[in-house]
Structure formats: structure tokens, C-alpha cells
Amino acid sequence: MLSLLTMAWLGGCAVNNEGPTGPPGPAGTPSFTRTPVPTATPQGAQLTVNLRSDANFVVLASTTITNSGHTVLCGDLGLSPGTSVVGAPVMSCGGVKHVTDTAASTAQSDLTLAYNDAAGRTTPALVAGNLGGQTLYPGLYKSTGGLAVSSGDLTLDAQGNPNSVFIFQIASTLITSSGRRVVLAGGAKAANVFWQVGSYCALGTTSSFKGTIMAHNQITLNTGAQLEGRALSQIDEVTLLSNNITKPAP
């Protein structure tokens, strides 16, 4: 959950950590005085993460790519240094398969640069646990553990600025529950949302996700999950199960 300071900023006002203000109650009943918590300093605008050649890919893996069912990729697929693509997905929108070729190798090198860029950003707002049901605004967010979207949908609100950038630094896992969504509002674009994941990512059945996922380990899209963005794994595999993955418009 968000810290009190972060919730204060996101809500646009100070919050209180004690009971309501008011006259003393009946004899023997204590009265409470509101103690305002200072509002956190708003985050500075973030520059986009330079994906370089990875901008062309919607799936990139290191060891294997495994697909089951009718998966459609609107963008390129890349695998390097691994060689095994099992259950070939349908390539659309002019997407091309790159397996152990120069383009795939370059894409992996560019992924390292993009991953390190996102991980190296400083002065984030701290978040933790389940982000479901929350609305977040442009900026840099950091979790020292895993993040989930489980008890509700997560809304990313650009507040009218389509160039606004959202970057999430996640030390461990990124997981969404079945049917949960990441919703873009206020002109937010999937092309400007980046998830740097220190471990693995799993998108739940029929969930809908937005942004570029850069995971150190495995990425799994469970049955019917949809992604407007990219599934890019540094050292592991990408598993697909009847999914639609679409390269976001710039």
C-alpha cells in the first residue's frame, strides 16, 4: 500500500492520522485533535525510457518462447541466444520473427540499456503490495518487493498531458489477477508506461495490461490476457496462451 505521504500527494491534500476534531465528549470520553501529515513533494516529470531497437518488438526472450492457442502479435518477435519457438503465434501488422539473428541479439543488448535506465532513476514515490483500485499520476514509483493488481483495476491518469511518463521500479514480481485491468486516463499512452521487474511477471487470465514490461526473468501471459505494450525478458522465457499483444502507438 502507499505510504501516508504518498497517499497525501496523490489525493492532492494532507491526510490525518488521528481522530476527528470536535468538542470533548461525555465525561470520561477523550477528545481528539487532528494532526495533519505534510503533503509529499510532487514528483518531477520523467523522460521516456529509450527502447532503441526494442521499440519494434512486442515479445523478446532469451531462452525460449512457448505459445499455446491462438496468439496474435502486432509487432516483432525476438529470441536470442535461444533457438526454440514452440507453437508459433500469428504475426500481424507486418511483424517479423527474429530468432538468433543480428536483430534479436541487438534487441537483447538494447533491453539491458533500457532496463538499467529505468532501474537507475532516482527520487521515486514508494509503493507496495496491491495497486488495485488506485489512481496514480505521472512519475516514478518504486517497490522494494513485489507489486500486484488484484483487488480492483489500476488507473494511470496523465491529467491531460499525453507526453506524461510512468515508470515503475519493482524489486521482485509483478502479478495481475484474473480479469484485472490497467486503465489509461487523462490522455495517458501505453507507449509512455514502463515496468522494470526484478524477477518475473505473470498476467492473469483475461486481464488487460498496458505498457512495456522489462523483466529480468520469465514473463507469462495466462489464457486470454491482452497486452498493449511489450513483453521483454532479459535472461528467461516468454510464455503465451491465446493472447493479443499490440505494439503501442507512439
Image: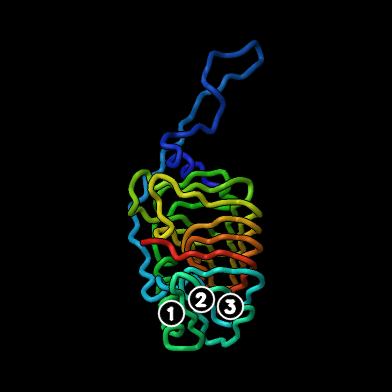
Give the mark, 3 or 2, whose residue is nearer the N terminus: 2
Q: Quadrant of residue 175?
A: bottom right
The disc label shown at residue 236, or none:
3
| Front tag of 3 and 2 | 2
Residue name at image x 43 percent, y 62 percent = 248
Helix, strand or loop at disc 1?
Answer: helix
* 130 versus 175 height, above or below: above
Rendering coords of residue 134 (x, y %) = 53, 44
Q: Left or right? Give the position of 41 relative to 180.
A: left
Q: Are marks 3 and 2 in contact (CB under 8 Å)?
A: no
Q: Amino acid at mark 3?
A: Asp
Colouring style: rainbow
Left or right: where 110 falls relative to 144: left
Name the secondary structure under disc 3.
loop
- Residue 244 lies, with reference to residue 33, above or below; the image says below
Of callouts 1 and 2, the N-terminal one: 2
Disc 1 to disc 2, C-alpha distance: 8 Å
User: Label 2 near label 1: C-beta < 8 Å?
Assistant: yes
Is residue 70 or residue 134 the one in the foreground?
Answer: 70
Report the amino acid beneath label 1: Ala
Left or right, 210 with respect to 86, comes to left
Q: Nearer the viewer, residue 13 or 52?
A: 52
CA neighbours of label 3 inside 10 A, class few (<14), some (14 to 19), many (20+): some
State the residue lying farthest toward the top: 26
Q: Residue at x 65, y 54 (%)?
A: 177
Rendered image: mark on residue 60: 2
Residue at mark 1? 107
Instruction: Name the kind of residue labelled 2 in the image.
Output: Leu
